[in-house]
Amino acid sequence: MHPLSQLLAAIQAGDDELAENLASRLGSIPTDDLQTLLRDANPDRRWWGVRLLAESADPQAVSLLAEALADPDPTVGQCAALALRQRPAEAAIPSLIAALASANPLLARLAADALAAIGQSAVPSLLAVLDGSAPVARLEATRALALIADPKAIPALYRLLEEDSQLVEYWANEGLERMGVGMVYFAP
């Protein structure tokens, strides 16, 4: 039996251990071969499609991973965000920014991690999230900006020091500290 067929049989049987073992040995699978899994009604199969797509060298993989961020099953989106963190791609920025506002806090956090991995190219989009977005999106955008530590974010991070959210304030201060411009307190 062909290794991909064996993998699909293990996924169908729900044998995750065998499927992972087979997946790690297969390496890159063409996206055309993954289309069935990515469009399956079963979220577990879609998750496996994204998991396999994460290993794909196909240039189309990034756009398919970006699409998977919006999957109705949060675990599929989380898997896609993890994959995009491992293979940072500017093309995924708009989808990752949208995922920051997810009702699923883990997906929002993983999307922020992926944006931080992209780095300076993500800064303008992250700065835009700070104005009028949902609280979770603002928090994760602030955290990503702190991790990136791009000097272009300094004015925005200073403004966030007056934020109502202690977590946003913490990450704004953390980002400023990373850039060496944090607040210094003097004893009178």
Image: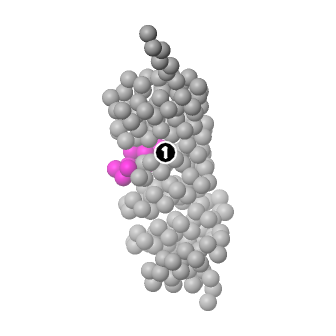
**Residue drawn 43% across the image and 71% down it:** 44
**Residue 156: image location, x then y, percent:** 48, 25
**Residue 25: image location, x then y, percent:** 64, 75
**SS assignment at label 1:** helix
Direction bottom: furthest residue: 1
Q: Is residue 48 magenta?
A: no
**Residue drawn 41% across the image and 38% down it:** 139
Above/below status of 19 relative to 117: below
Structural crowding at the residue carrying mark 1, measured as other residues with C-alpha within 10 Å and reported as few (<14), some (14–19) or many (≥20): many
Quarter of the image containing the C terminus? top left
**Residue drawn 49% across the image and 60% down it:** 79
**Residue 174: image location, x then y, percent:** 50, 32
Question: For this rendering, which residue is in front, 128 or 35?
Answer: 128
Direction front: furthest residue: 187
Amino acid identity at mark 1: Ala
**Can the viewer see residue 188 in this picture?**
yes
Question: For this rendering, which residue is in front, 181 or 45?
Answer: 181
**Residue 68: image location, x then y, percent:** 47, 59
**Residue drawn 39% across the image and 59% down it:** 74
Query: Would you say 97 lies left or right of 103 here?
Result: right
Quarter of the image containing the N terminus? bottom right
Query: Would you say 165 lies left or right of 100 here?
Result: left
Above/below status of 47 relative to 83: below
The span shown in magenta is 96-105
Above/below status of 166 relative to 2: above
Q: Is residue 103 magenta?
A: yes
Query: Would you say 132 lies left or right of 1 here?
Result: left
**Can the viewer see residue 68 in this picture?**
no
Task: Say which residue label 1 marks.
Answer: 112
